[in-house]
Each structure stands twice: as C-alpha cells, then as structure tokens.
Amino acid sequence: MREMQRVARPITGSDRDYDRLLAAIGDARIVLLGEDTHGTREHYLERARITQRLIVERGFGAVVIEGDAVPAAIVNGALRKDGSDHNIDLALRAFDRFPRWMWRNDEFFELLRSIRAINLHRSESDAVVVGGMDVYDLARPVAAVLAYLQERDPSVARRSKDRYDCFATIDMTPQRYGELLDAPVRTTCEAPVIEALAELATMGPSQSVDLTAGVAHHAALQSARAIVASEAYFRALHDDPAHSWNVRDAHMAAFVSLLLAELERRADGARPGIVVWAHNAHIGDARATSRGESGDWSLGQLLRERFPDRVFSIGFTTARGSVHAATEWGEPGMSKRLSRPPPGSHGALLGRVRPRFYLVFADSRRAREMLARPRLQRGIGVRYLPLLEREGHYFSARLSLQFDAIVHIDRTSALHPRIID
C-alpha cells in the first residue's frame, strides 16, 4: 500500500495534473478513456481534461464515443466554425435512444463547446471530429447512406434501396428482426447489406475539388459499415446472445482502425490520434478478466493486438457517492446511491491510496504486481441494481494487465442530464 501511495499522482484540478500521464502516453495514437459507470459526473469531467490536452498538445484529431454513428455525425456538424451553443444542443437531441443521458448531459456538452472553440482556429481539414462507433441504430444509417447516394449516383441509390428494403417489413429493431429470422422461411438481410457496402466502397470519393467530398464519402462508408455491423449484432442477439458482445466490440475496433487510417490519409504525413470514450469493459483488455476467460474479447484487447505500440488505455474507477442510472432498460434514469465496494475488491483497495489520484502502472513494478492479482471489479452500465450488486455488477479482473493506467476518484456524483428546450 505504501508503494502505491508513493507513486500515485494526486488530482488537484491543476493544469499540470496529468503531465506524467501524457508523458507515459508518449507516441501512442489511440488513447482509450474508460469509466466504471455510464453515469458518473467526475469520469466525464476528468476524461474531458485529458482529451483537451491530447488535442491541444499532441494534435489528436478525433473523439470516438460509445454512441451511434448518425447522432455523433450530427453533433460533429455542430462543431464547425459557424456553430453555437444552441446548435450543439439541437445536435444532442439526435441522441434520442435510451439512455439519452449518456451523451445528453452537461458534462459532455462542455467538452463539445471546447472542441468547437479549438476548431475555430483550425482549417476544415484539421478540425477535430466526433464519431460514434456503436451498433444499436439501424434506421438512420440507412437513411444517411441513401441520401448520400441519391446526390452522388441515383442509380446506385436505387440498387441500395432495394437491398435495404430487406428491412422494410420490420421497424429495424432487434426484436422484430428476430421475428424475421424465426419465420417459416428464414430470411436474413446479411447478404444485401454486405452487397450495398461493397458497391459503395468501390465508388471512392468523388473527384470534386471540394474538401468535404472525401469527408462525405467516408461518413457514408462508416454508415454502411454500421448497417452491416448492426445486422450482424441483431442476428447474434437472436441466434447466439453470448456472442453478441464480441460482434459489437469487433465493429468498434474496426471503426477506430478505419478512422485512424482516414485521418492519417488526410494528414499528409502528420501523426493524428484518436481519443476513445467507452466503458471500462470495452476499453480494458478482456484477457485480464473473468469475462475474457469465458470467451469475450474487447475493443481494448483487439486494438492492442492490432496496434501493439500505439494504444494506451486508462481505466476510471470510483467507490462511493452517487450515480445516474436506471432500474430497468428503457426506464427513466435517476440519481442512485452507490454501495460501498466489498473488502478485497479493487475499489476498496484503491480507496485506501488517496481520495483522487491516477497511477501509471509502468512507474512501479511492485504496485503493478499488486494490482495484477485477481480481485473483484465493479462495472455499472445504464442499469444499477444495488440489491443485486455482487452478482450483477462485479467480475474478476487483474487491473494492471487490463489497463496501462488507472484514474481513481473515491467519492463521485451523478451525471447531470441536459434539459434541451
């Protein structure tokens, strides 16, 4: 414990708080910022501070979130030079799927304001972009691809519409897609959506001299890939629910990889970077958890395997206070009191180090070895059930193998959902 207290860096609110963390990040071009709940205010605030420094001091050019592609693209459009606070609020309305508070909150709004201010001093090609890598949305990516193709090549738009009409008999939800799969003559939309993506990919950007032409084509490709991933995810939820997590995280890893390649192509020799905001369960290395032992992989694991020297992952933990979460899926969120972590868990151990600190595991072999032992780790998503805390919110993890660094804030508060008129 004394060794961890020695190497732990206090978080005081100073501009220099994260100097050591940025030094440890070094030349990494993908920085993964986690959270152990989807509703902790301080996690959003500290991730924003780190993100801003990576953008300003290291030239990072994108923030990718655990959110759907089209709402993120709408938000991205509000961060141009003619943007305003009101435009950002209007864009945040696009996050209308449960849980809305995950991105429609005051803390994320302030990060977006800071990105817009940064973009005021950057060229269009150098502007910071926001992207969404999740797979729950199907209808809006279909509409986005068809709108792009209608302007670019109406004949391709007609063929793509025919392919996407596979979904026409359902409302593009996992439940209704399951009914299609259960029909007497089983039908899947797998082949037509892959064909639509393949045709779009062969087109390439238009030859327009307008810089936005390439950006528009890339956005359409991302939407088409999201459709393919959503179809696979919906199908897995029906056919093999245990495998659906892996389908989702594989798409997330592909999204980040392709975006990095696109940024590098546009940067003309520069070395852009991406900050990723997602739950600890996604950004951590699943091989260091009991979930990985059961066959799950994770975004963080896949990116480490693909870019072994270019990824740096930072887990975020808390022990007590309050969290914004729902009781059941689809119900309104509310502020809930966090139960204290059980003795021997990572949360209980870290709570004895400092109230607010971060720890870079490369700084101490002894601390690294101590946190490489399997201990219980809490993970709260959009639902929190204190009465089922142990069985519903804990799994075994080896913290220093799961992440490259950890940010621990012992007492935290609930996220502030943003009321948008």
Image (tube, grey):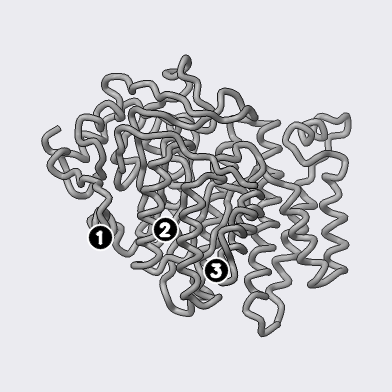
Q: In this view of the protein, which residue sits in the foreground, 339 or 152?
A: 339
Determine the residue positioned at 56% across, 27% down. 326
Determine whether 156 is above or below 32 in the image: below
Determine the residue positioned at 62% across, 64% down. 77
Residue 96 relative to residue 324: left or right: right
Contact between marks 3 and 2 (CB within 8 A): the answer is no
Determine the residue positioned at 64% across, 58% down. 74
Q: CA distance from mark 2 to mark 1?
A: 14 Å
* Label ID, residue 23: 1
Mark 3 vs 1, N-terminal side = 1
Q: Position of residue 274 (x, y in %)?
A: 45, 60
Determine whether 257 is above or below 366 in the image: below
Q: Quadrant of residue 206?
A: bottom right
**Amino acid type, residue under disc 3 in the picture:** Glu
Q: Quadrant of residue 235?
A: top right
> What secondary structure is found at the residue carrying circle 1?
helix
Mark 3 vs 2, N-terminal side = 2
Between disc 3 and disc 1, the foreground one is 1
